[in-house]
Image (cartoon, rainbow, N blue to C red):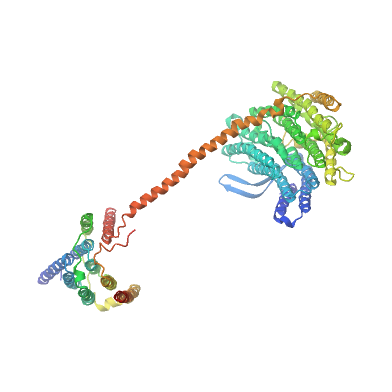
Amino acid sequence: MAADVVVWIVWCGAAFACIASALGVVSFSNPFFSALALIGNLASLAVLYLLLGGEFVAAAQVLVYGGAVMVMFLFVIAYLGEQAREAPWAGGPSWQAVGTVLAAGAILGEVLVALALTTGGRLRHEAHVGRSFGSPAQIGHLFLTDHLLAFEVTSIVLLVAAVGGVVLGSHARALEDDART
Amino acid sequence: MTAANAAAWVCLALPLAATGSIALAGTRLSRRGAGYVSTLTTFGSFAAALVAFARLLAEPAGARASTSTSWTWLAAGPYRFGLTLLTDQLSVTMMLVVAGVGALIIAYSLGYMEGADEERRYFAYMSLFVFSMLLLVQAGSLLLLLAGWGMVGLSSYLLIGFHQERPAAIAAAKKAFVMNAVGDATMALALFLLVEQTGRLDDAGVFAAAPHGGTVANLVALGLLGGAVAKSAQIPLHTWLPDAMEGPTPVSALIHAATMVTAGVYLIVRLHPLFENAYLVEDLAAGLGAATLVMAGLIALVQTDIKRVIAYSTMSQIGYMFVGAASRAYPNGIFHLVTHAFFKALLFLAAGIAIHALSGEQDIRRMRGIGRTMPHTRRAFLVGSLALVGIPPFAGFFSKDSILAATIDRGAFGAVLLACGLLGTFLTGLYAFRLYFVVFGGEGDARPHLHGRAEGPPSMVSTVTVLAGLSAVGGFLQLAPVWTPLTTWLAPVAPPFAEPSGAHEAIASAAAVALGLAGIAVAYRLYAVAGARVPRPWAVLEHKLYWDELYDLLLARPADRLARGLGRFVEQLLVAGSIGEVARGFQLGGAEVSRMQNGLVRAYALALAGGVAVLALVFLSTR
Amino acid sequence: MHGPDVLWYLVLAAILFVTGALGVLVRRSPLIILLSVEIMLNGANLALISFARRSGHADGQVFAIAVMAVAASEVVVGLGLIVAMGRRRLQLDVDTLRTLRG
């Protein structure tokens, strides 16, 4: 019983942090603060993954997302400096704001309705899982047997991104050289 | 397929092969060569027709008809249409006439058309015509008959307009084609009705299943009559035939005397069950025939072009055939068709020798006097004219009088027909011998060019001689009521309504011959005796009873004005304008829609989100 | 150990997703938009992992790892673009970058 309470408390804390940091990302005008809020979001999500039995995914989340992607974000924000900050908060056509609220609210409402409709029993009972659920061995096994194609395609996607990054970077350098001379 | 059927297929295929090979060989084939190809294949067709005839004679009388289908064109549900040939007594008779007279005339053309620039085209067209006509007479299904009907009209158009550099020829060809198209349309409508009523178009089936009496039967017969009237140049669709004389003389002989224009008579005889279902239309046909034969005879009295006189004579004689066929004297009508083919072709070809010798002169006033230097042609023309008038023992006597006899039994209407027929006989004597005396008798200045000692090339002279012989003896094919092999032969296919009695035949013959001789005598008095005063013809007759002017006023001018009006209002404003408006509408719409592409990424993203929301709603609601 | 039902995780994932969508639609800086897209992807990941737990098969986690890899690649390219725009001294405002128009 005590374990349940602990789990509940952890869950509530992580959920609250998750939502708060998400709102923070979209609200801060300083992009640096937005990136930091995203890091917080990622951390709280890692906790939630652990609660769901996905140890490997939680670790990957922290390492890949937090360790690589967010670092890259922070580098770019630092590089851009004042340019990044100057972007205004919001604006544009008036119907944009109204439409946004409507669309987003509609999607949220529909998803909640869908979830409510299924609580006839389908989402209540979790399956019994063993200790090896979510372990790296199981994930690796799945990647190399059932989802081999996804594995390979993802590696190609990563390659493409790497090439694209290099191309974008070199182009910009060439243009800058032209601009300077 | 019996041996007769096989012979019929060969008969049909040979002219088609000739046309095809002449057309494909092009300039590799010499002009003379093309002529020989055409002539020999047509003689081959005649031989095949003889074979078919012999095979049919070997069969018992009741079992002579046979059909053979080589290819089913359309098999859909209950409908079966195909390339079906019918080989029976009537079709073999027509095959013999078409192929035989056709072969003679094409042989004649070897001499007549020599030196013309486009001989190959001419012979290809002539073979095409022979093929089409054979298809028409051998057709075992009404659909195939209509196909042959149309092709014959096409060949006629091509051959009338053969001298393409002459605008008059082109206009005449168009006129013939348009008037025939009217007939084709009515025939097609009749066939639609038949298919709707009976579901089939093969001869045997449709006769059994066609309705007896009633509106549909009358409409069908009327439609078929329309086609017959157009093709045979009877009132009211007759004005194209005189103009069709713009074509070369052998064309006039073959198409517009011996074979194509008689297709209407053949139609009535072949489809007689359909006509017998609608006696009102039969009476109409007889009436039109009688009216035409009198009118054409009157107009022929005043024509000055030799070919036009013979053309109106053709119109008049076909009127006789219509009277005969519509009076259900089918063997008599066919008999006159056969003899008419002989002597009318003879008249045209003999006239052709004269025209050829005079280098194209066709005005009879300028042809006077050639009788002296062209005695052979004169004799041939005399034989033909006597056959035409119906003086025994020449061919026309036997055939025409039997038609007249058949009308005696038909009550008051028959009396009117008989009166017209007898008047026509008088007029025939008058105009035929007016022509003979003016052209071949008497003094004149015409100086023909002769070929050495002969009057024309050997091909022309020999065929004219053969036809003269046929006109002289061809009548002995049937001497009613004593000797009737033709009636017996055709009876299983086209039985006559009633055989006129011997007394009626005698009365009719006597009256007709007497009137014919009276006509000749008057002509002699007016034209042969030197210094006789020729009465001035009525202007009405000279203008061919103003038929052409009437049609121009009723049809040609309103059609022209309608076309112009449509062009200005409907075409420019509605059709072209509406296309422009549609284009403008699209342009405006596109401009409006393109305002949505404002380049704002956020607006695009909003559109995406909105779309997702709507789709989720749809999915939720259909659960 | 029993915690909240999978249902709650899914509700949370939905809220994350919509929050990220709001960010994409409302903000004008491409950097912030990219961050909001990351939030949306994370919301989807959370839903995937929840379903994996619910069904007992770890396929959802495999899917989530693949999503992470793709998200990383996308961020590389996106940031590369932003850096290129910065070098060219373009205004980093999505509303003014509107040459993609009809």
Residue B344: percent from the left, percent from the top? 78, 36
B576 relative to A161, above or below = above
Residue B547: percent from the left, percent from the top? 66, 30
* Residue B595 visible in the picture: yes
Residue C38: percent from the left, percent from the top? 23, 68
- Residue at the far front: name it: A181
Residue B114: percent from the left, percent from the top? 79, 48
Left or right for A94, reference B406: left
The answer to which quarter of the image holds residue A9 is: bottom left
* Residue B483 visible in the picture: no
Identify which residue, B465 or A109, lies in the foreground. B465
- Residue at the far right: name it: B453
Left or right for B304, reference B282: right
Which residue is depicted at the point 73% across and 36% down? B492
Which residue is depicted at the point 74% across and 50% down? B117
The answer to which quarter of the image holds residue B104 is: top right
B33 relative to B346, above or below = below
Left or right for B179, reference B537: left
Q: How many marks?
A: 0
The answer to which quarter of the image holds residue B157 is: top right
